[in-house]
Image (cartoon, grey):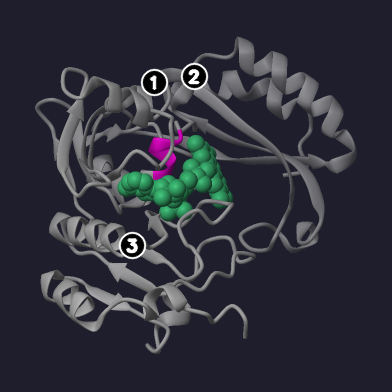
Amino acid sequence: MEKLNFKDMNTIEKNKLDTFLLKLSGKIVTPEDVEYNETRKVYNGNIDKYPGMIVMCSDVADVIAAVNFGRENNLLIAVRGGGHNGGGLGVCDNGLVIDLSGLKSVRVNTAKNTVRVGGGNLWREVDHATHPFGLAVPAGVVSSTGVGGLTLGGGVGHLSRKYGLTIDNLLEADMVLADGSFVTVHKNQHQDLFWAIRGGGGNFGIVTSFKFQAHPVKTVIGGPTLWPIEKTKEIMAWYHDFLNNAPDDLNGFIATMVIPGAPFPEHLHNKQFCGIVWCYTGDPADFKELFKPVLALNPVF
Ligand SMILES: Cc1cc2nc3c(=O)[nH]c(=O)nc-3n(C[C@H](O)[C@H](O)[C@H](O)COP(=O)(O)OP(=O)(O)OC[C@H]3O[C@@H](n4cnc5c(N)ncnc54)[C@H](O)[C@@H]3O)c2cc1C
């Protein structure tokens, strides 16, 4: 029970807490609430932290109020975007979690091929919104990753060979800083901060909205190929040469993996493989010829 020590929260005077709650349009979740255990979870199931309070922000005003409340009461603060960070940076023990999952909205500007995205969106929500317009923003390879953490860390994925990192496509960001002030940063405004958030991680402020350059991506041919784990060295050496010489329309993400279950056939379940997950965005008519060398290596799937 040592973990259930919310001493930081218990030292806050009741009137300060009441004033904070009056400013909130979202809600707070505390250890007394039934949804507490579900709400404190992050993607990595090994992370088991017990925050004193989780603020479920619903707009920028909530973020400002939460930052001010945390600073004025000297609380440890963790900011959670998609909650995907492997080390569990989006949650903390005892302190205040500022959860951005209520800050979701994706607006595509089809005249300029730009996309405005909320600080709490997940990448699958961005893909869903841009796809009808034949557009996409370079992001990671797992769709449940948060836009916030991935972007601030750089962001590399299937479209990066052709269109660069996620931060190469970041045009502008709205931010709440540690003193509670609000700024918009881009290449001509707060240039140092704009530089810092393009790869510097989450400590420069809370991004409440991102603006990205999108690119024409309409038809994608994708999926995995698998080889027996014993062939990993051979496949990796081949992959290095093959991808370096392949057109930028093709990307492959190589990994050793255990096949979990469906949709893969049963005889592959729970076995180890060397796999490459492919993504091709070029002319579909050229794919068969381009992919011939892959199939010549006799993948088992
Ligand atoms: C299964 C898996 C696959 C992955 N694949 C890729 C990949 O293909 N490409 C790649 O580049 N990365 C990949 N990553 C890494 C991923 O980008 C990082 O873990 C990233 O931090 C996740 O962002 P998040 O918002 O979901 O995480 P969170 O845990 O919510 O946050 C991570 C960090 O970012 C900060 N943060 C989040 N949102 C904001 C915001 N709006 N403003 C300010 N700070 C914020 C948090 O405070 C924290 O410090 C992968 C991770 C996993 C677990």
Give the x, y percent position of residue 136: 31, 34
Residue at 68% of width from left, 16% of height from top? Answer: 242
Q: Nearer the viewer, residue 289 or 204?
A: 204
Residue type, numbered disc 1:
Tyr
**Mark closer to the observer (3, 2):** 3
Within 10 angstroms of label 2, few (less than 14), some, or many (20 or more) residues? few
- State the separation of the CA atoms marked 1 and 3: 30 Å
Q: Nearer the viewer, residue 277 or 56?
A: 56
Q: For the stretch drawn in magenta, what is the main secondary structure? A: helix
Q: Secondary structure at mark 3?
A: strand
Q: Which residue is mark 1?
A: 163
Q: Which residues are magenta?
A: 149-153
Q: Is residue 178 above or below residue 35?
A: above
On whether residue 95 falls in the magenta region, the answer is no
Nearest to N terminus: mark 2 or mark 1: 1
Give the x, y percent position of residue 44: 58, 60
Q: Is residue 143 visible?
A: no
Q: Nearer the viewer, residue 252 or 42?
A: 42
Q: Is residue 217 above or below residue 73?
A: above
Nearest to N terminus: mark 3 or mark 2: 3
Q: Is residue 150 left or right of residue 58?
A: right
Give the x, y percent position of residue 164: 42, 21
